Image (cartoon, grey):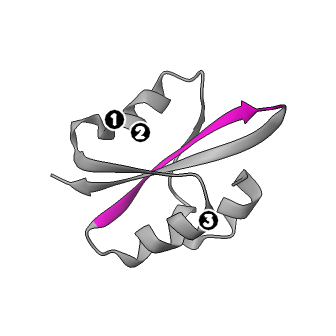
Amino acid sequence: MNEAQLSLCPAFAAVPIYDESDERAHSIMSGDGKAQGIRECTRMKEVEECLENPKLVPLGGVRFVLDGKKAVVVYFGELV
């Protein structure tokens, strides 16, 4: 998915989105010790499914470039 698609989702209005090269991106991908059961979503349908699960909270997103196109991977976790 791209960042424009993600911006349409109100749950991500206050959630950080970092560039792949940003050191803070690792804390999102790992849950930074505050979350377990990390889920990685590359499609909007996956994001919608995770948002329906009350046990999962959005941790943030990571921007990257794949085949010359910008994309965002979104991470969810279960709070510890």
Q: Are marks 2 and 1 in contact (CB under 8 Å)?
A: yes
Mark closest to the chain's N terminus, 2 or 3: 2
User: Amino acid type of disc 2?
Assistant: Ile
- Give the CA separation, mark 2 to mark 1: 6 Å
Q: Which residues are magenta?
A: 56-67
User: Amino acid type of disc 1?
Assistant: Ser
The answer to whether 4 appears left or right of 11 in the picture is right
For label 3, the residue is 44
The image quadrant where one finds the N terminus is: bottom right
- Considering every residue shown, the one lying at the far front of the view is 67
The image quarter in which residue 4 lies: bottom right
Q: Are marks 1 and 3 in contact (CB under 8 Å)?
A: no
User: Amino acid type of disc 3?
Assistant: Met
For label 2, the residue is 28
Labels 1, 3: front one: 3
Badge number at residue 68 = none
What is the magenta segment's predominant secondary structure? strand
Disc 3 secondary structure class: helix
Name the residue rendered at 58%, 72% in the picture: 10
Name the residue rendered at 57%, 62% in the picture: 13
Residue 2 position in % (x across, y down): 73, 52
Mark closest to the chain's N terminus, 1 or 3: 1
- Give the CA separation, mark 1 to mark 3: 21 Å
For label 1, the residue is 30
